Image (cartoon, rainbow, N blue to C red):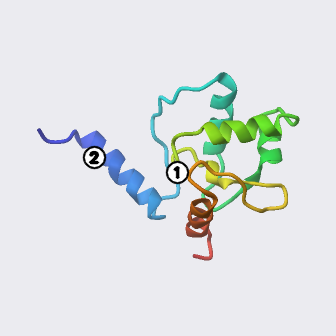
Amino acid sequence: QPADPAFLQRIRHVIASIDGRDAALSLPLDIQGTAFQQQVWQALRAIPYGETVSYQQLAKAIGKPNAVRAVASACGANKLAIVIPCHRVVRGDGSLSGYRWGVSRKAQILRRESPDE
């Protein structure tokens, strides 16, 4: 049975985003998490392609400046790499820290998103 045209368009959109041709990746998601996790994940989706924020900045952005560790935990609970770009969150000093799929992969994705690439 042929694939649904809308589904095929979404697949093309995801591939284009991963290839860096289309920075905006907006897909309908039905990811399960706590209200706090959902809030963090929504904020992650607002981080522009090619930019990073610190865990502290993200905590402030959601109105919970003292919840830095909880924000980091919500990032770690994210199961949708790229679509919910937790790779764009770094330590306050700009260094990389934990990533569900490994820090080396996080570095690779960030390099790929870098405007200098």
The secondary structure type at the circle numbered 1 is loop
Vertical position of residue 15 compared to residue 63: above or below: below
Residue at image x 63%, y 51%? 99
* Distance in Å between CA atoms under marks 2 and 1: 18 Å
Identify residue type, mark 1.
Ile
Farthest right residue in view = 66
Q: Residues within 10 Å of mark 1 (few under 14, many from 20)?
A: some
Count of marks placed on residues: 2
Which of the 4 image quarters holds residue 34? top right
Q: Residue at x 72, y 60 (%)?
A: 96
Residue 8 — which label?
2
Residue 14 left/right relative to 83: left
Nearer to me, 104 or 114:
104
Identity, as a three-letter code, of the amino acid under mark 2: Leu
Q: Relative to residue 37, is residue 18 drawn left or right? A: left
Q: Residue furthest top?
A: 35
26 horizontally vs 75: left or right: left
Disc assigned to residue 82: 1
83 to the left or right of 92? left
Q: Residue at x 11, y 38 (%)?
A: 1
Question: Horizontal and vertical percent for residue 76?
Answer: 64, 41
